[in-house]
Amino acid sequence: MIVLAVRWYPRFNLSYRDVEELLVEHGEEVDHVTVYRWVQQFTPLLADAARFARHAPGDR
């Protein structure tokens, strides 16, 4: 669920409270402050992991 919260927040331009409500709909009760902490902690890690998946311009 952490990955979903960290992906939903920037991808869909949601507030932390919106993400909290979406997680409740999926059966996970978390506070919006917890979502904030997850985003702050894990967004740089996901960005670094995605950097390796990018292709160079003109690379096919």
Image: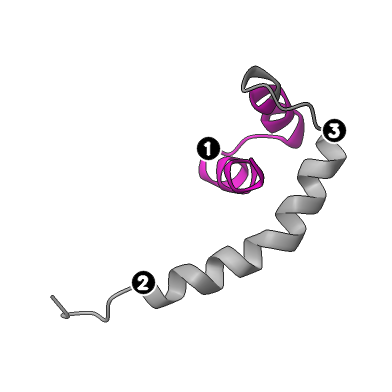
Highlighted magenta segment, given as a residue range: 1-23
Under mark 1, the amino acid is Phe
Residue 1 is drawn in which quadrant? top right
Res 12 label: 1
Q: Is label 2 or label 1 in front?
A: 2
Name, please, the residue furthest toward the left. 60
Q: Which residue bears the numbered disc 2?
A: 53
Residue 50 image position (x, y, % from top left): 45, 68
Main secondary structure found in the magenta portion? helix
Q: Residue at x 56, y 47 (%)?
A: 7
Q: Along the horizontal axis of the image, is 54 left or right of 23?
A: left
Give the CA distance from mark 3 to mark 2: 32 Å
Q: CA distance from mark 1 to mark 3?
A: 19 Å
- The numbered dot on residue 31 is 3
Name the secondary structure under disc 3. loop
**Which of the two labelled residues, at mark 2 and mark 1, occupies the earlier sequence position?**
1
Three-letter amino acid code at disc 2?
Answer: Ala
Identify the secondary structure beneath mark 1.
Answer: loop
Identify the residue at horizontal 75%, vertical 61% (top origin).
Answer: 41
Quarter of the picture containing the C terminus is bottom left
Q: Give the tally of numbered discs.
A: 3
The Cα atoms of the two marked residues, 2 and 1, are separated by 21 Å
Task: Please say if 55 is above or below 50.
Answer: below
